[in-house]
Amino acid sequence: MRYSFPGKVVLVTGASRGMGAAILAGFAHAGAVCYLNYYPDAEGANQRDAETVATGLRSAGADVRLVAADVSRFDEVEAMLKRIATEAGGLDVLVNNAGIIRDKSLKKMTLDEWHAVLRTNLDGVFHCCKAAVEVLRDGGRIVNVASIAGIVGIHGQANYGAAKAGVMGLTRVLAKELAKRQITVNAVAPGIIETPMLGAIKPEVRASYEQQIPVGRVGKPEDVAHAVLFLASEESGFITGVSLPITGGWF
């Protein structure tokens, strides 16, 4: 099935590269008005990547608009959603994809590394959901990008796993709170996916993971994007509060 989102307004956070860019591209090719959020780093790397993604999609006729905001800061998130409401009249789909990793064993993990991941990966999702419900149209969709790390324990990811488990818990609560407005709230829980984040994993660790994946390969960002588009579609209207593992059978 080919999904269609003509005229729908979609915000994807952390969409300058990797899974976020693939998810945004899926919506763009399906006719949505796409807001590409990126973190405004001091070096400007994220903005350059975001502009590259946007330029490629615009050349194919897509409507892609850039919005810089640090999701860990509620004031920036609130300003971003107000801009979208003003420009586009409202929001139909929110995809909370922005995230960071600071992997270390509990013994070596600093307090700053713990809090940085929680602020972006969990607080950021809460901030975006809280600001978005004010502009999200009835019948809208929220899809949170969690992780299999929030279900199974992965060595060195106490901060990341805790944050992603929190995202799945938040998903279940919001699904019930927003159901009366016919807004569904679901999550995807990717396993090992070929993204820039995967480069932070040691080659021997990656090889070990690959051997455990029954389909015999790591996932592609598009594997996640297809699932997100389904959960954002009208056809998934009776599915809410779900966290869907995307792992090639690993879990």
Image (spheres, grey):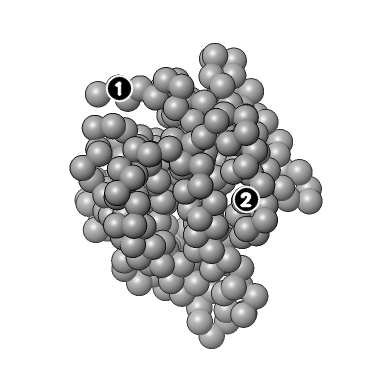
Q: Amino acid at mark 1?
A: Arg
Q: Which quadrant, please, contains the C terminus?
A: bottom left
* Label 1, label 2: how far apart the Cα atoms are: 33 Å
Q: Looking at this rendering, what residue extends furthest in the right direction?
A: 42
Q: Earlier in the sequence, mark 1 or mark 2?
A: 1
Q: Would residue 108 be visible to someone looking at this image?
A: yes
The local secondary structure at tag 2 comes to helix
Q: What residue lies at 22% left-to-right and 51% top-to-bottom? A: 249
Q: Of residues 46 and 84, which is closer to you in this image? A: 84
Evaluate if marks 1 and 2 touch, with contact meaning CB atoms under 8 Å apart. no
Mark 1 — residue?
2
Q: Which mark is residue 43?
A: none
Q: Would residue 209 be visible to someone looking at this image?
A: no
The local secondary structure at tag 1 comes to loop
Q: Which quadrant, please, contains the N terminus?
A: top left
In the visual, does 176 lie left or right of 60?
Answer: left
How many neighbours does mark 1 have within 10 angstroms: few (below 14), some (14-19), or many (20 or more)?
A: few
